Amino acid sequence: MIICAGNNETFDFATPMGVGMIETTLNLTRLCLFDKPEFLLFVGTAGSYGDAKIFDIVESKTAANIELAFLEKNAYTPLENVISTNTTNTQDIIINSSNYISTNIELTQKFLRLGVGLENMEFFAVLSVAKEFNIPAGGVFCVTNYTNTEAHADFIKNHAKAKELLTKHVTKRIKELTQK
């Protein structure tokens, strides 16, 4: 099953789950309880902490939930904050999730040093629910912006093209898989 966030980030081939970690967790859990999918593929946009370029397509099976306060040593968590459905030895770009969009480039550079490359509001929730229900899962992302003071303006400017690129990429991948 292919899923996406919702609101203005929808795709003809994907079922919307909600924006942010809470809506996504609630709606995806409800879906899994009543009609458990065999596989989950999340499709969405992401902000880059610096290495990935605008309009890059990134596939990953690893997500984190690391807040900016943690980077400044102003917070800690007793909870698991990195989750992966990757069963291969290949290294994923880690996608960080928060209900906030990062705009402080000095802080977000610290994510790169931790091996975290992108941020997307929903992906940690998707992998958390997938893990709970023992469902293989992954994500495909198109970079719309860097995590800086222009993050929102760049997201708005690049969102439509990113959705087009994601649609082409996912459609191509589906075609490749169905021809095997």
Image (cartoon, rainbow, N blue to C red):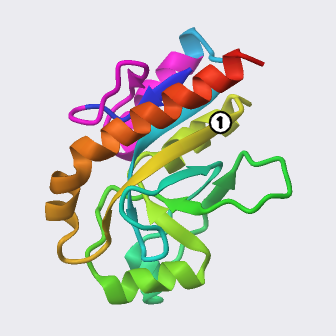
In screen coordinates, is 82 left or right of 9?
Answer: right
Tag count in the figure?
A: 1
The kind of residue on which mark 1 rests is Ala
Q: Give the image location of residue 168, x and y in percent.
A: 44, 33
Q: Give the image location of residue 53, x and y in percent.
A: 42, 67
Q: Which residue is mark 1?
A: 137
Is 153 situated above or below 142? below
Q: Give the image location of residue 134, x and y in percent.
A: 74, 31
In screen coordinates, is 64 left or right of 45?
Answer: right
Of 19 and 109, the residue lying toward us: 109
Of 169 and 128, the residue lying toward us: 169
- The quadrant in which the N terminus is found is top right
Q: Residue at x 60, y 80 (%)?
A: 114
- Mark 1 lies on a secondary structure that is strand
Magenta span of residues: 7-32
Q: Residue at x 86, y 57 (%)?
A: 89
Of 134 and 16, the residue lying toward us: 16
Q: Residue at x 13, y 62 (%)?
A: 153
In screen coordinates, is 136 left or right of 17?
Answer: right
| Residue 78 is inside the magenta segment | no
Residue 10: quarter of image: top left
